[in-house]
Image (cartoon, rainbow, N blue to C red):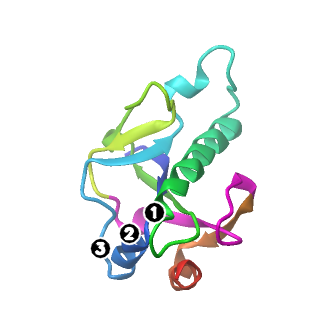
Amino acid sequence: MPLARVYLPLTSADLAALADGEPLGPAPLDAHAVTPALGRPGLVTDEEELEHAAWVAATLEAVGLTEGGIRRRVVAAADVDASTVLHPTSPDVPSRVRLSAPVDRRRVVSFHVDEEPGASEPTDLLWYDVTELAQVRALVG
């Protein structure tokens, strides 16, 4: 089955659920991905640049999740069954998609976490392998 890369802004509760072996969800679940709307004429059409645009949109959305106990943005990249990705859900955010199924931990491929608490630029995020979930949780607090 074909896979689609999605980017999911996460909360500390999401990280705890993953650590406990639970999936991200429940469905429907909002995420960001390369969509036909991102490749409209006049916009970027290179696949890597489209992926980056979807990732940036997820990092910007993650800013809204940094209230309370989480002071660093966290975004997970996951490869999900393409049939679960519904395109797009918001004309104002062309990368926004809705997932029709929860995301199992085995589908998560990496985490992206703010280098410093309170950062707001996409370039401020560090990359962590999915096996480094404990380190990500420690950074987030």
Q: Are marks 2 and 3 in contact (CB under 8 Å)?
A: no
Residue that mark 1 sits on:
10
Mark linked to residue 89: none
Report the number of discs.
3
| Residue at x 50% of width, y 32% of height | 93
Indicate left or right for 31 with 138 as reference.
left
Mark 1 residue type: Leu
Nearer the camera: disc 2 or disc 3: 2
Region in magenta: 103-123
Q: How far apart are marks 2 and 3 (CA)?
A: 9 Å
**Amino acid type, callout 3:** Glu
Residue 97 percent coordinates (x, y):
41, 38
- Label 2 crowd bin: few (<14), some (14–19), many (20+), radius 10 Å: some
Q: Mark 2 points at which residue?
A: 14
- Secondary structure of residue under mark 2: helix
Name the residue: 27% across, 45% down.
100
Q: Position of residue 34 (x, y in %)?
A: 54, 36
Q: In the visual, does 38 lie left or right of 84?
A: right
Residue at 50% across, 41% down: 33
Task: Looking at the image, tell me whether mark 2 or mark 3 is earlier in sequence order.
Answer: 2
User: Circle 1 sits in a helix, a strand or a loop, which is it?
Assistant: loop
Snapshot quadrant of residue 13: bottom left
Residue 45 as seen in the image, left or right of residue 22: right
Q: Which residue lies furthest to the right in this view?
A: 123
- Give whichever of 2, 7 is nearer the camera: 7
**Which residue corresponds to mark 3?**
22
- The amino acid pointed to by label 2 is Asp
